[in-house]
Amino acid sequence: EYLTKENITIPNFEKYGFGLYKIFSRYSVLKENRISPKRKSDEVQLADIEDIYDVQRIAQSIFDPLCDFIPTIKELEIFVQNKELFIIKKDEIIGFALYLKQPYGYDFRLNCVVPEYQSKLVGYKFVANLPNDGKKYICWADDNNSSAIRLNESIGFKTDGLKNYIFVRNISN
């Protein structure tokens, strides 16, 4: 991992057997610059302790274990206790989001929707329901995930220049 806000050449880690895998950019928005969503959703609800196994299963099936944050059961229990984990259910959980309370506001840590609902505004419902009591909101997005970037930009998030370069050991070496 190489984290920088500098507009410099990234060090060549290939000579050590690592290749560039993914790039994430940090996005943020101040409360006063946040674009109010057209409508909030009453489908977004706090997760219960019995939801954490389904949430973890969904995260493990969708997120990349080499570079994405996949919470453990213990972490999910804490998020539920802190009222930071939100879900949308139909017959079962179709998506979840994690809004971590920070001194500055919120870290919109995860927004995950099962594939069959990804084009049905479920992700937007989570973004539209971000808590209103923060001064600043931060999230990270994979530079190749144009859907997530458009979604975050739709409510005012803008890149702040911080990038996280993920390197993995080159398997061919």
Image (tube, rainbow, N blue to C red):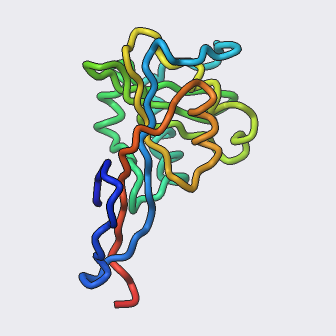
Residue pushed farthest bottom? Answer: 173
Please tell me whether residue 138 is drawn above or below residue 1 in the rendered image: above
- Residue extending farthest to the top is 133
Q: Position of residue 64 (x, y in %)?
A: 47, 58
Considering depth in this image, is 105 or 52 the residue closer to the camera? 105
Q: Is residue 44 above or below residue 9?
A: above
Q: Position of residue 86 (x, y in %)?
A: 49, 24
> How many discs mark residues in the rendered view?
0
Q: Residue at x 38, y 14 (%)?
A: 134
* Residue 33: image location, x then y, percent: 50, 17
Q: Quadrant of residue 29?
A: top left
Residue for point 47% across, 52% down: 60
Residue at image coords 59%, 33%: 153
Q: Quadrant of residue 53?
A: top left
Give the position of the C terminus as an image quadrant: bottom left
Q: Residue furthest front?
A: 7
Query: Viewed as shown, does residue 77 lie left or right of 85?
Result: left
Residue 80 rendering spot, x and y as whole percentages: 37, 24
Q: Is residue 133 above or below residue 53?
A: above
Quadrant showing the N terminus: bottom left
Q: Nearer the viewer, residue 158 or 87?
A: 158
User: Hey, which quadrant is residue 14 in on the image?
Assistant: bottom left
For the point 69% across and 13% down, the residue is 39
